[in-house]
Image (tube, rainbow, N blue to C red):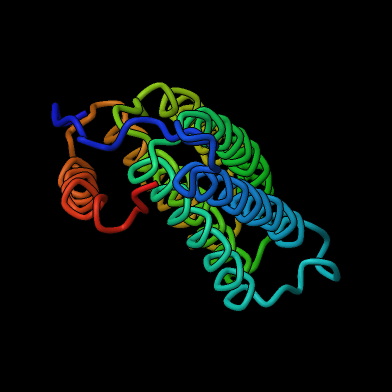
Amino acid sequence: MNGQKSTSPSPTQPRGSNGHVSQRGMLSVVMSMVSVGTLGVSLLGGVKLAYDILGPPKESDVKLFSAVVALGIAYGVGWFTAMVAIRVYGNLILPILIGWFTLACLVGVCYLYIEILKRLYDQKYEFMNFVKYVVVMTTGLVAMVGLHLIIEDHNLRPYAIPLLIISMIQLGLIVDRYVFIGSKSSVYYLFGDLFFLAGMSAFSIFTLAHFGILNPLRSHFTNYFDRNSVSIRTQD
């Protein structure tokens, strides 16, 4: 990504050379379990939150702020423990699992995008529903980018392709809705369509073009753990 290589420690083993259990290896395993568990819970909670928001009106009365905060805490714990397990203790299995989590997050975001497009096209939503659509989509994209930052040299550009394709489908739906079919509803529906299209298209284009916006943040994480990994991890 930014050409900088981390000086993270070599992979740790559960058992040391003297036959005793390695604390570093055990901590790596424990942190991996905590990370996978909390990230899994947060992603499953995100699926439930999206289902509630997109469900029928009687079932979509969800406390959005509280739900996002709760999921954010679970995600933050999983993100931090994964970062420490990989950058400090040199865990080799967790990056593979994080890659699968990132792919699952992309699938969820694409499905959510398609479901939201159906509601935007039907124009049967209220303003607060639209706000919830924007919040849950933004949350999904932030979660995907956060997982991407955990793994060094992870390429996010292929993930932008399906999102860009769906954005072009949305553009076609907007033309069909307002040109071929016609719409007599309030103009704010048009602004909602264009706002969502602009946001998703911008995210996809910036990700696909790979302008290096996230490189300073990735470098900050890498430099921090390179400087402090020795003092953080145990020596046996």
Residue 172 visible at all:
no
Residue drawn where x is 48% and y is 61% of the image = 76
Q: Foreground: 200 or 191?
A: 200
Image coords of residue 30 (percent x, y): 58, 50
90 horizontally vs 26: left or right: left
Residue 46 visible at all:
yes
Image coords of residue 56 (percent x, y): 83, 61
Image coords of residue 39 (percent x, y): 59, 51
The N terminus - image quarter = top left
Q: Foreground: 24 or 21?
A: 21
Q: Quadrant of residue 231?
A: bottom left
Q: What count of labels does the image hold?
A: 0
Q: Foreground: 112 or 43?
A: 43
* Residue 37 versus residue 56 in the image, above or below: above
Residue drawn where x is 18% and y is 36% of the image = 212
Residue drawn where x is 20% and y is 35% of the image = 7
158 horizontally vs 189: left or right: left
Q: Foreground: 104 or 83?
A: 83
* Residue 7 versus residue 62 in the image, above or below: above
